[in-house]
Image (spheres, rainbow, N blue to C red):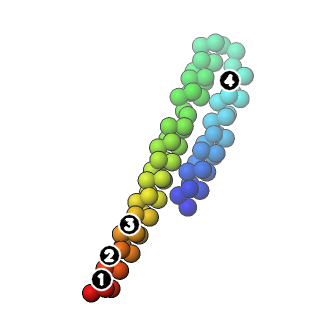
């Protein structure tokens, strides 16, 4: 579910973000056009997605490591 969340959040957000580029073509005043261009460039979720991927990888690693440690400790208890 976490993988689907990370993949889906970027797609949905980028669809909404593309409206900035569509609106930019309608604006004739260069100062106001720059505002829309800046909004588009500053509203990128690329860093957030990168952090989410790192978190996802670390979470999976800790989950696997925790399962291995649990299995190891239960096998030691079973030998007593």
In this rendered view, identify the residue nearer to me: 37 or 26: 37
Residue linked to disc 4: 24
Answer whether labels 4 and 1 touch (C-beta < 8 Å): no
- Residue 79 place in picture, x, y as percent: 31, 85
Mark positioned earlier in the residue sequence (2 or 3): 3
| Residue 72, quarter of the rendered image | bottom left
Q: Which residue is mark 3?
A: 66
For mark 2, what is the residue? 73
* Residue at which label 1 appears: 77
Q: How far, Cα to Cα, is label 4 from label 2?
A: 61 Å
Q: Position of residue 50 (x, y in %)?
A: 51, 42
Mark 3 burial class by Cα count in 10 Å: few <14, some 14-19, many 20+:
few
Mark 4 vs mark 1: in front: 1
Residue 62: x and y, percent?
40, 60
Q: Earlier in the sequence, mark 4 or mark 2?
A: 4
Check the image and report above or below for 25 versus 52: above
Q: Secondary structure at mark 2?
A: helix
> Residue 21 or 53: which is nearer the viewer?
53
> In the picture, residue 36 is in which quadrant?
top right
């Amino acid at each position: 579910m976490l993988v689907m969340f990370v993949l889906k959040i970027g797609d949905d957000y980028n669809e909404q973000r593309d409206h900035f580029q569509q609106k930019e073509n309608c604006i004739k005043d260069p100062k106001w056009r720059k505002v829309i261009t800046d909004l588009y460039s500053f509203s990128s979720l690329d860093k957030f997605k990168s952090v989410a991927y790192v978190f996802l990888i670390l979470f999976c690693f800790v989950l696997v490591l925790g399962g291995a440690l649990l299995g190891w400790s239960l096998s030691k208890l079973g030998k007593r």
